Amino acid sequence: MRSNTLTWFACGLLIVAAIAFMVIGDPETALGITDTELARLVTGTALLIVIGSSLAISYKGRGSLALKQAVMWLGATLFLVVIYTYRAEFQAAGNRVLGELVPGTAITLQNADENSTDTNIVAITADNAGQFSISTTVNGTYVEMILDTGATQVVLTDFDARRVNINMDELVFSVPVKTANGTTKMAAVRFNDVSVGSINVSPVRGLIAKPDDLGTSLLGMSFLKSLSSFEIRGNQVILRR
């Protein structure tokens, strides 16, 4: 019975609000709020009355349970508000954890320097051997590379070159290159783009190694020189562009 009374009261509130709309005419002038805001206020109040009355009846005689569940819902709501408010900080912390758990993953960082023009900053954590094995994309294809500041250009192995759709039959191996195994010749190419995380460089000069001449593709200076800066800080390399 009480529920019906409150429901009728809510309906009456909506009718009174409708009449008020017609009498007031322009609520923004009279009340300082817009038509939409006033409509939302009235509708929300009516819904609150209906829902509140239903809850009050369902929890009748069980005040402690109602209080306990209200506190739980309030806590959950506050938790979600905090998560949303500090979402950038939580994302940054999650990225740092991911970087430690999966070395080589490019983690995007926030730029703390307001005077800097760098819009893309990524960090890569070294692996257990101390090498920076970096998850890279070349011509849109994933390629695992070793950061090598001693390599003048980005160098792909024969296997990786085929994966990024380089036509090996058209290559001319005429560029002399010194490697750990001695001097060899590689083929000069130009990649459409090379990306590490959010950093993309296009185009990029590169080299293709002969079969069995190179064990791992190398992220060399033709990519690194296109950046604003790069530095090794502890067990991380920081790339800026």
Image (cartoon, helix red, strand yellow):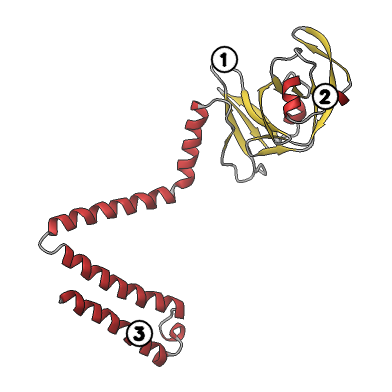
CA neighbours of label 1 inside 10 A, class few (<14), some (14 to 19), many (20+): few
* Total residue callouts: 3
Of residues 173 and 25, the one drawn nearer to the viewer in this rendering: 173
Left/right placement of residue 160 relative to residue 106 reads right
> Residue 58 shows which numbered tag?
none
Name the residue that disc number 3 marks: 17
Q: Nearer the viewer, mark 1 or mark 2?
A: 2
Left/right placement of residue 107 relative to residue 23 reads right
Res. 161 image quadrant: top right
Res. 173 image quadrant: top right
Res. 154 image quadrant: top right
Q: CA distance from mark 3 to mark 2?
A: 77 Å
Classify mark 2: helix, strand or loop: helix
CA neighbours of label 2 inside 10 A, class few (<14), some (14 to 19), many (20+): few
Q: Amino acid at mark 3?
A: Ala
Q: CA distance from mark 1 to mark 2?
A: 32 Å
Tell me whether the residue at label 1 lies in contact with that at label 2, contact meaning CB atoms closer than 8 angstroms. no
Q: Is residue 220 visible?
A: no
Give coordinates of residue 35: x percent, y percent.
45, 81
Left/right placement of residue 18 relative to residue 141 reads left
Vertical order, 60 against 155 (above or below): below
Residue at (50% x, 27% y) in the render: 100
Name the residue that disc number 2 marks: 168
Residue at (31% x, 51% y) in the render: 76
